[in-house]
Image (spheres, rainbow, N blue to C red):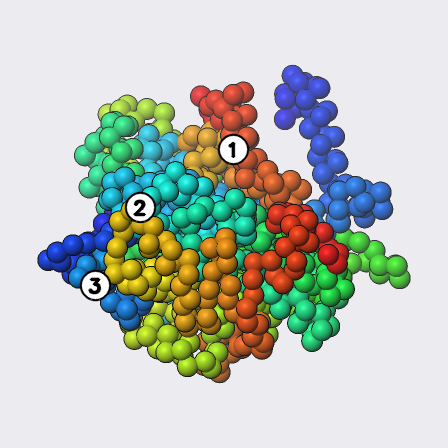
Amino acid sequence: MLKGSLGLIALSSLLLSGTAFAQEKIKVGVTATLEGTYTVLGEDGIRGFQTALNVLGKKVGDKELEFVIASTDATPDSAVRAVRKLIEQDKVQILLSPLSGDEGIAVKNFAKTHPELTFINAASGAQETTYVDPAPNFFRYNMDGAQWQVGLGKYAYDEKKYRKIATVGEDYSFIYTQVFGLVLEFCGAGGQVTNRQWVPLGTKDFASVIAALPDDVDAIYLGLGGADAVNFLNQYQQAGGKAHLMGGSIMIDQTILSSKGNAKNALIGTLAASGQADTWENPSWQKFVKDYQDAFPANKRFPSPSLLATNYYDSTMALILALRQVNGDLSNNQAKYKEALAKIEIDAPNGKIKLDSNRQAIGTNFVTEVVDDGKGALFSKVVKVIPNVNQTLGYDPAVFAKIGLPSRTVPECKKY
Amino acid sequence: MTRFVERHPAWALIVIIAIAVALWLIFAVWPQGLEDAVGRKRVFLNALFNGITLGGLYFLVASGFTLIFGLMRNVNLAHGSLYLFGGYVGYAISAATGSWVLSFIVAFILTALVGVLLQVLVFRRMEGQDLRQTMVTIGLSIVFADLMLWACGGDFYQIQTPNWLIGPVELPLVTAVKSSGEPVYLRYPLVRLVIFAASVVIGVAMWLALNRTRIGMIIRAGVDDRDILAATGVRIQLVFVVVFALGAGLAGVAGVVGGTFQSLSPGEDIRFLLASLVVVIVGGMGSIPGAALGALIIGLAEQLGSVYIPTYAIVVTFLIMVLVLAIRPQGLLARR
């Protein structure tokens, strides 16, 4: 904790230095996982956030935005602690937080105790955050884990002809949501999910988990992220693993694809789905990639932005554009601002985004395959684009509600 | 051994039965009923071997920790930083030269040097003041962690496994018999076996050095009573420096090992500090055989736990620690 806050002071003072002479300021608190298993994800999130500031600028009318960054470690209590510190100590008015699934649920609940402030989700993707008892002042401009898996199950069944798969995932809400999306679609198409293994977040030694993987399946789905994913792949290679792989949204992502060492090569050809695809030809995506690349020297960033950078970029974009619509007016408990946020449609690099009545994003999803660019760098290549993905995944809301909330065993492998 | 059997016949019987059951589980082909009840034998054997090899890594880290504590009563909470530092050095060397073996040597030397600096500049100034040493080393570990974050970033590093170590080998242990009557042998990652063998060699060498050589005699005498030892004319400060260098160097070597079969990233320092604390508490502060036993127990508990009770795997290690603290607070193999 102490370690992180040292880094923060350095970071935030950097950000603050430019704003010293502005007349009126609007204070925004940002959290990211700059510690623990998801450190790399948090760092790239912050890069996405800074790219957005480079592109959009920090001025809102005659007011200037001022940012304070706090660090978390992907646990819910660390997120609440950071948010509380930002509100009580730094007196921020708007929050851009948090990054990870469990954090999201905790911050959403905390948001209810501060109805006068505005919370904009930075990147977290647990379904429950906006689906169950949503907070009226919590806005999420990224899709949830299940939406990010749309298209994967069907593509695997129809095109790859996978019939039986097993899953390995980290034991927390975001990965539950991802597996939820996958199982729903794959089993709906007629496939079978024979085995779901859950490992604690922060597992280092996967050898026994790898040994317990079943042999009689067509593919193994990996819902891991950060250090866990890298360790898994490393040990998978050492154990001589040869199965077909499928990946979740933070598994097949630049945070893993550009890790050092050659274990990541096991991922070449892996099928995955996510809210973005590295090699999408869309001009606004290409522009974002270029902005990101120009903002940082090549050794201080990934070859292409990760999903976290994109999410932070989109959220920051919504935050600033809506604030400009109301000309920085935060009076009357920020009522006008909240209204603008709920209505705004942003032209994000990864497709248009608008919010539903729970203030949850409806956006575009991508099915991808990992390719080698010939120079040793790995990218996710788009194989299918699915627009207008909503939180109930196209199901009738009443049917969707019957499936239950994502957990270790929900949903069952059947057609709903 | 015979004395133990004579004194505790009941315990001896239980131990013998437990060993027999373990051997049967490892070597026999499991009957169908057992496979149905607890899962495939391959999974069990893998978890068992993983536990033992992970124990090897924990032993490498914890032995340095316990050695330093045993002789100097220094609780060096910057030990995890030395582990991570060794790992980063090993990565840099192996990336620059492509030599895995060289990375061990350089990591050992550099972390040993850092250890010497720590001993001379920090610990010597506050000899005998446990609390101050603890606070200072916590502070140092935070400073080191930030320096390493600054130098290496938050990325994950893996040290390249040399080609001759990649992939699995077949062990002569039958995990199942195919319907054609052909036995299926256990396939196991070679690199883990090599690492385990290396940690056994290091452990045995340390035991021999401590129990069979003159310098070992001096160190043991120092553990028992360093004032008298100093009074007999031994240059005790020099002994301290050597032991500190060795303990730190071992942590550095462990860093290379950890970087090879797991990965290096910020936060690993704390994780391994915690692991070696738990290992040392279970095994007994200051005892090398204790560190070996503690490392084995913790490694096995983590791995068997992750397969058979995944939900509670994280708790098992600490449960063991609590149990040991409750029943035998000085540690399983502590001398006093």
Residue density around tag 1, few if under 14, some if 14–19, many if 20 or more, within 10 Å = some
Q: Secondary structure at mark 1?
A: helix
Chain bearing mark 1: B
**Mark pair 2, 3: CA separation:** 19 Å
- In front of the other: label 2 or label 1? 2
**Mark pair 2, 1: CA separation:** 47 Å
The answer to whether the residues at label 2 and label 1 have Cβ atoms under 8 Å apart is: no
- Whether residue B280 sits left or right of residue A399 in the image: it is left
Label 3 is placed on what type of residue? Answer: Gly
Whether residue B256 appears in this view of the structure is: no
Residue density around tag 3, few if under 14, some if 14–19, many if 20 or more, within 10 Å = few
In the rendering, which numbered label is found on residue A71? none
Can marks 2 and 3 be said to lie on one chain?
yes
The answer to whether the residues at label 2 and label 3 have Cβ atoms under 8 Å apart is: no
- Whether residue B146 sits left or right of residue A243 in the image: it is left
Measured from the top left, where is residue B78 in percent x and y? 32, 42
In the rendering, which numbered label is found on residue A333? 2
In the rendering, which numbered label is found on residue A61? 3
Mark 2 or 3 closer to N-term? 3
Q: Secondary structure at mark 2?
A: helix
The residue positioned 71% from the left and 32% from the top of the image is: B18
Instruction: In the rendered view, tell whether residue B212 sits above or below residue A9.
Output: above
**Mark pair 1, 3: CA separation:** 56 Å
Measured from the top left, where is residue A309 in percent x and y? 39, 64
Q: Give the labeled residue for mark 1.
A: B318
Say which of A88 and B233 sits in front.
A88
The residue positioned 24% from the left and 27% from the top of the image is: B129
Can marks 1 and 3 be said to lie on one chain?
no
Say which of A416 and A145 sits in front.
A416
